Image (cartoon, rainbow, N blue to C red):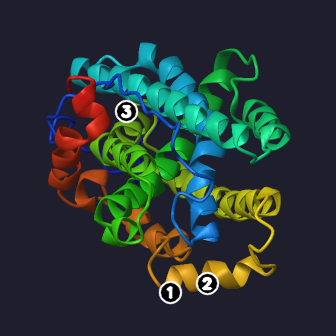
């Protein structure tokens, strides 16, 4: 393994919870275009999950699968295998939502294809070998660990955002995003622990965390703008950034400042994702999620 100077190794097993994929299914047939009533912009913020995340999650799962042979710790190997299964299920479920929205008038195919191409070109294995392959694997693990920090924080927000129910968000979409958010909280430590096991360099962790933040925020903004332009509603309004600010102030969507305020916590020496907070809310939701219960979980 590489030199671990400056990095804090976390004894694996503190969150001794088995990670496993839940074979859930969602019926999107009755989901309308704007499934958060009266909230066009907020709906498309959520839609970014259906549009962008599937390709990123596939790339993450592929990266963890590539790292698996390097991990000898039996417990961590088990968690990584469960993580790969969960991310694959997330990608498939969101892809189903995207296909449904496209079938009712939200034309996103060309953008999705471009995102898939970019993810493959930027985050693929590039056919490297030897030392270059090892270094690129570590770099991707660092990037994905940083990204997973934000998805865990957003997952916590989704589980606590009572305003989504108050606004009358369609129950299928609400269950989809909360199920996903709960599993992000559930497996929040796995990629970080894999990175620390395979590499653990603090310098790489810091560099890739900044890069992850600098990548995710523009991606969300550009994707939201694209979806808003593609929305067929004639009276959706013109100046979407103002609607974005308004929705943030009202708490209908998470604040974009999360991409900045979370950075100091993630970069604090001794940080571990288990410090984000108890996962009780996530596990309770996974025990009562309509889709998870229907699948027998």
Q: Residues within 10 Å of mark 1 (few under 14, many from 20)?
A: few
Q: Quadrant of residue 231?
A: bottom right
Residue that badge 1 annotates: 249
* 24 displayed left or right of 234: left
Task: Quarter of the image for the N terminus: give it.
Answer: top left
Q: Are marks 1 and 2 in contact (CB under 8 Å)?
A: yes
Q: Nearer the viewer, residue 250 or 202?
A: 250
Q: Residues within 10 Å of mark 2 (few under 14, many from 20)?
A: some
Task: Quarter of the image for the C terminus: give it.
Answer: top left
Tell me what residue is drawn at x 19 percent, y 28 percent: 18
Q: Quadrant of residue 275?
A: bottom left
Q: Earlier in the sequence, mark 3 or mark 2?
A: 3
Residue that badge 2 annotates: 245
Instruction: List x then y, in percent, for residue 202.
Output: 46, 52
Instruction: List x then y, in percent, for residue 3.
Output: 45, 38
In the picture, the disc for residue 12 is none
Residue that badge 3 annotates: 197
Tell me what residue is drawn at x 34 percent, y 43 percent: 179
Tell me what residue is drawn at x 75 percent, y 37 percent: 122
């Amino acid at each position: 393994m590489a030199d671990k100077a400056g990095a804090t190794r976390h004894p694996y097993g503190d969150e001794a919870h088995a990670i496993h994929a839940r074979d859930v299914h969602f019926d999107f047939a009755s989901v309308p275009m704007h499934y958060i009533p009266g909230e066009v912009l907020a709906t498309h913020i959520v839609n970014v999950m259906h549009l962008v995340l599937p390709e990123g999650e596939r790339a993450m799962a592929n990266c963890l699968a590539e790292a698996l042979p390097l991990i000898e710790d039996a417990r961590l190997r088990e968690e990584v295998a469960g993580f790969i299964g969960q991310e694959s299920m997330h990608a498939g479920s969101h892809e189903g939502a995207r296909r449904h929205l496209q079938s009712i008038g939200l034309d996103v195919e060309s953008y999705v294809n471009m995102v898939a191409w970019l993810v493959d070109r930027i985050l693929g294995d590039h056919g490297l070998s030897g030392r270059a392959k090892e270094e690129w694997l570590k770099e991707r693990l660092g990037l994905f660990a940083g990204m997973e920090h934000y998805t865990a924080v957003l997952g916590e927000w989704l589980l606590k955002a009572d305003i989504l129910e108050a606004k009358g968000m369609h129950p299928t979409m609400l269950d989809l995003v909360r199920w996903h958010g709960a599993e992000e909280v559930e497996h929040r430590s796995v990629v970080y622990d894999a990175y620390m096991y395979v590499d653990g360099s603090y310098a790489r962790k810091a560099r890739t965390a900044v890069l992850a933040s600098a990548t995710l925020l523009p991606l969300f903004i550009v994707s939201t703008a694209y979806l808003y332009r593609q929305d067929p509603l004639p009276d959706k309004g013109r100046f979407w950034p103002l609607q974005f600010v308004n929705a943030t102030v009202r708490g209908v969507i998470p604040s974009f400042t999360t991409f900045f305020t979370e950075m100091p916590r993630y970069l604090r020496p001794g940080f571990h994702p288990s410090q984000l907070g108890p996962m009780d809310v996530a596990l309770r939701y996974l025990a009562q999620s309509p889709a998870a219960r229907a699948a027998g979980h």
